[in-house]
Image: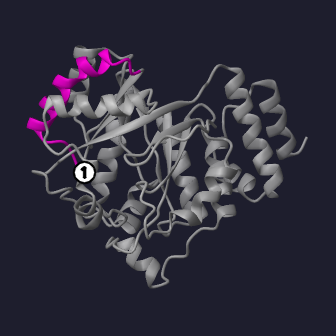
Amino acid sequence: MNKLGQIENNIRSGLFFGLSSKEELLYVYSLPLPQLVELAMAVRAKRKQGGAGPDCCASGYLPHNGGRGCEMSCGFCGFPQSIYQWNPQQFVSKLTEGAIIEDAKKKKEMGATRYKIVSLGCSIRDDEYEIAIKALPKLYGLGFEKICLSFGILSDDRIRGLVNKFGKEKIEINHNLEVGTPELYEKLIGNDKLLWMARYNTISNAKKYGLSVCSGGLVGIGETVNDQTELVLALRSLDVNSSPFNVFVMDKNDKSAIAEKIREGRIKRPSDEELLRILCMWRLGMPKASIAVNSGYGITREGDFGIYSGIIELALINDKVSLPNQGILGKRRY
């Protein structure tokens, strides 16, 4: 039996545990698109048969760094320069327990089943951490399945403290790897390699204590297909429960380093077909994980969000819907 036949047979028999090598991932990426999509859809069907269903996650942002946005300078990020200043109302304007609860209530009314508290920057400040943690019991009272904490880099002690205080079942920890290796983090993101290791260790420690974890990465920042295999393998090694497939988009005000490279022609934008191939590779590499397709921060005015809208329509292998901070939640469930 050839390689493709073996993969198909394993999926049908329920013995498919995901592609675990760079060679296998590159092999499926190179398949004719109909065959590749069929494989990914077969994995999705098996997930549904096993009881996996969609969930809807909504985010609320904390005004980290004294309300001035993020102090970091990631090559992909427009928060410090444009998005935070351009649309500050999408953030909790005054960090209080009440403000977090009111924001969560709005997201619940819009259909969210999970709520994520997001701190901008490398890690959450101690005072903001305490305020956010005090809100958790009331957030649970609103009926969310889980509360996801996206607080950046977390120490082993802090993760253990969260488990001791709230248990394992209703907390999820989010911290995206962005790319698959420390070297790529330095090359493509522009930050120190040690920060990538800290991201990895945060998710690894959360898994160690039995918590559900959410970690994904970026597409369209100048990476190669080979680089994408590194990301899939890194996420796979962490056994992530949920993985955001984040497509980099930009508007005319985006001052990030990657946006400038795109304008200068130094980064080639991936086509819809290339995005779909990468997404299928994620599905085949991480069959146990929920995957959410995200395109930027929900900004459509004068931007290029539309050039990637096709990937959302084509990629019927998505298990998770992310509720944008702006707009309304669509009815589509993948």
Residue at 18 percent across and 42 percent down: it is: 124
Magenta-drawn stretch contains 332: no
In percent of width and height, residue 25 lies at: 67, 51
Q: Is residue 172 above or below residue 246?
A: above
Residue at 42 percent across and 20 percent down: it is: 145
Q: Is residue 100 above or below residue 71?
A: above
Residue at 39 percent across and 75 percent down: it is: 252
The reply, left or right, for residue 1 in relation to residue 203 is right
Foreground residue, 221 or 56?
Answer: 56
Which quadrant holds the N terminus?
Answer: top right
Few, some or many residues within 10 Å of mark 1 (<14, 14–19, 20+): few
Q: State which quadrant residue 13 falls in.
A: top right
Q: Is residue 156 visible?
A: no
Amino acid type shown at disc 1 = Gln
* Mark 1 secondary-structure assignment: helix
Give the residue at the far bottom of this rendering: 264
Foreground residue, 312 or 191?
Answer: 312
Residue interval drawn in magenta: 121-144
Q: Is residue 105 above or below residue 277?
A: above
In percent of width and height, residue 148 lies at: 35, 31
Residue at 68 percent across and 25 percent down: it is: 48
Q: Identify the image's colour scheme: rainbow, by chain, secondary structure or one colour.
A: one colour
Q: State which quadrant residue 87 falls in.
A: bottom left
In percent of width and height, residue 154 lies at: 24, 37
Question: What main secondary structure does the magenta stretch of the protein show?
Answer: helix
The residue at which mark 1 appears reads as 89
